[in-house]
Image (tube, rainbow, N blue to C red):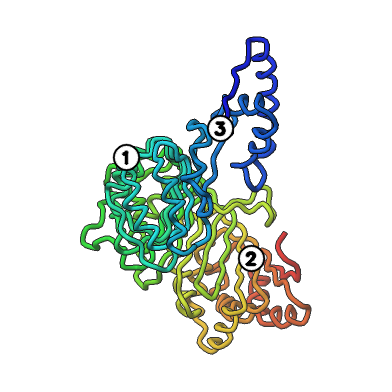
Amino acid sequence: MQGQVVMPNRKARSVNQRQSEIFDFCQMTQMYRYDPPRWWHALVHVCRRWRYIVFESPLRLHLQLLCNAKTPVKKSLNVWPRAIPIVIEESILRPPQSGANVIAAIEHHDRVSEIDLYASSTLMKQLHEVMKKPYPVLTRLRLYMGQNSAPVLRGTFLGGSAPRLKELSLTGIPFPALPKLLSSCHDLVDVELRKIPDTGYISPETMATALSALTKLKFVYIGFESRAASPDPTNRPPSLLTRGVLPALTRLEFHGSNEYFDDLVARIDTPAIISVHTWFFFQFDFDIPHFLQFIGRTQMFGSFKEADLYFGDEGVNIRFGHCDPPGRDDFQIALSIMIFCHGLDRQVVCAAKICGKISPFLSNVKRLLINSNEVAYLAFWNWKDHVDNPRWLEIFHAFSALQHMQIPPKLGGIIASALRELTGERVMDALPMLRHLYLPSFYETFLSTRRAIEPFISSRQHSNHPVTAHLTEMD
């Protein structure tokens, strides 16, 4: 590989062009395999001419040099042409001394195009000291930290500049100076900030300002480790606020306190948004006025057709989406809200609060699926003598246009108890448009649930708004 590469004559260049097009095809087919950075290695070992053709077009053929903790960087890196960018990957946490090769590769700041590292705290400290220069060709940066505390990244990280960066993912790494770096990353498409420690807190106002400058951004995930990462409650944003626009953003995901997310979406507009997924820490005072305004000014959220209500061992999750044409396989989630809480009393309260607040946007929901896992069912069973029927009715009140509702077998008795409240003069107080109840289960369970909801079925029949119970699932 260190021998001289002979330049071809003019006639040979035409042949080389055709050969290069063949290599293009090889590159396209190999991109879908497990190890794309090495697809071209076999070609350059065929002959000197092939080697010249491949190395003549490193960008066209997407050539990459893969380095990890086992790569003898200092011995082998200079063998390859400098025009080939370096990709650094290390997904296994190894002993601290194994990071020497990784550090040696990262020191080539003008050649590194991708970094994907699961780093120990020792390696992270080394990275913090080494990566103080700008990385002009870096397009992808993914850094992961495990359970150990990571050092706080300062404003000198990456020299404060990565102009070609398209994907940024930090997990468990505090980086309060991140907005400074983002100001140089005008090509960013994906930003993932997961498990942000308290030492890496960035205020909603600062975060919104930094993200609004990224006009190509399509996906954002912001997640905090603890509830301590919440904004000052005395400094909540006013309703009339100039908002930044993220014109290309289609997916927004958040894990943290509802106050932080409420402050964040108060400061941004996302005209192209398709889905929003949130995971909130539990609290009794669930106030989201700006989130509701955000939903209201987002056209995509004005046409929910289906909803899922799921009770799990970690919390309650409510998902709203579209289904056109109808069918569970076609259900597209547009908005999901999960609240982490244990105990079905809290979960039902949270579900009632969410559905009550978001009810103005549920006027077109025709189908509701209620489900739970085994852990939630056992909690319900232990709680069966203290069923909060009014809270269940608050949930049902939010779905004024509901026509189809599916009840899980193990919660049939619980929900039937709430539905029995809708008899006599109260028969139309909730679910006025309901026409079909689906009780998928064994036949014996179906009969017991059917008997439990008989007062509700009978009252609806007499009111000329009949409801039919089905043994099958919704289709």
Q: Residue furthest top?
A: 10
Q: Secondary structure at mark 3?
A: loop
> Where does residue 430 sit, x and y in percent of width and height?
54, 68
Sequence-wise, the earlier of marks 3 and 1 is 3
* Residue 221 showing in the rendered view: no
Name the one closer to the observer, 199 or 448.
Answer: 199
Q: Nearer the viewer, residue 60 or 251?
A: 60
Up-down: is 178 above or below 400?
above
Q: CA distance from mark 2 to mark 1?
A: 48 Å
Q: Amino acid at mark 3?
A: Gln
Image position of 380 with respect to 277: above or below:
below
Instruction: Read off the residue under disc 3.
Output: 2
How far across and how far down the image is residue 427, in percent? 57, 72
Residue picked out by circle 2: 405
| Figure quadrant of the N terminus | top right
Crowd tier of the residue under label 1, counting other residues whose Cα lies within 10 Å: few below 14, some 14–19, many 20 or above = some
Please tell me whether mark 2 sits on a helix, a strand or a loop: strand
Left-right relation of 222 to 23 = left
The residue that mark 1 highlights is: 183
Q: Amino acid at mark 1?
A: Ser
